[in-house]
Amino acid sequence: MLQAPGGAYDPEWSPDGKTLAFISAGKPEEWAGLATIPVNSTGFQQKTILSQEEDLDGGSVGSTNWSPDGKKIVFNVDGPPGAKRGLYTVNTDGTDLTKISWPKTDPETNIRQNDRYWLGPTYSPDGKRIAFVKGWDDWQIYTINPDGTDARQVTHDAGGYEIQSWSPNGEKILYENLSNGHRDLFVINADGTGRQRLTSVQSSAEDLNRIHNVLWLP
């Protein structure tokens, strides 16, 4: 049984299919922390992994993704000044909360600012890299090691990005790009080479051409 007074959002299956991770809102209209619940369980077995108030300093979890071995969850956090922000990993029991993103530094004053808008973190199939969108200055796709080292920029074109998924062999990244009002699918090698456009969708005033839930064939 699931108990989330404010709602439960964005469920993600664990790799073994036995557990769901989700964003649990403690109060209506407020996104909160990270929780898990066993599938096919009886009784109340929801487990809060991270509390918005106690662990995230008022920050809200945005999206989550399991590591392929099922031992960690990567997620992004945003919130008001003073809250935790950025990309984090955590063990599934709530231990070892680790920030893997880096804060923005003002080029004129060299002052580190609160970092925001790290979106869509997604583990590669072998768990060795995490892809994400860095939104606070360039809105480009990057990959990074799970420990936060060796960040590499993948895309370089203008427009907003949304990661769809890694290819099953981990060699390519499928993503959605918004440029000049057009939302289309592209695929690119994980090292940033070989960019290929897959669709050509006409724009619409209602933005009805948004692409959802694109899957790779095995």
Image (cartoon, rainbow, N blue to C red):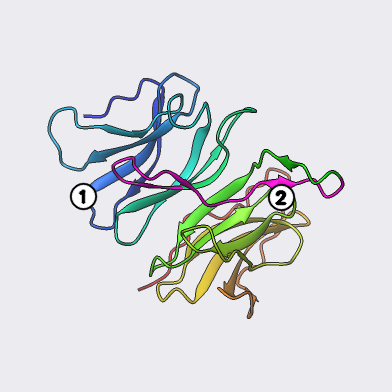
Asked if residue 85 is among those painted magenta in the image, a careful observer would answer: no
Query: Which residue is found at the position 41% from the left and 76% from the top?
Result: 169
Q: Residue furthest right?
A: 108
Q: Total marks drawn?
A: 2
- Badge 1: how crowded within 10 Å, few (<14), some, or many (20+)? few
Our reading of the magenta stretch's main secondary structure is loop
**Residue 133: which quarter of the image?**
bottom right
- Badge 2: how crowded within 10 Å, few (<14), some, or many (20+)? few
Q: Nearer the viewer, residue 77 or 100?
A: 100
Q: Nearer the viewer, residue 180 or 158?
A: 158
| Residue 140: x %, y % from top left | 67, 59
Disc 2 marks which residue?
Answer: 204
Residues in magenta? 89-108
Query: Which residue is found at the position 55% from the left and 73% from the top?
Result: 190
Closer to the N terminus: mark 1 or mark 2? 1
Query: Which residue is found at the position 25% from the left and 46% from the top?
Result: 19
Q: Amino acid at mark 1?
A: Lys
Disc 1 marks which residue?
Answer: 18
Disc 1 versus disc 2: nearer the observer: 1
| Residue 139: x %, y % from top left | 69, 54
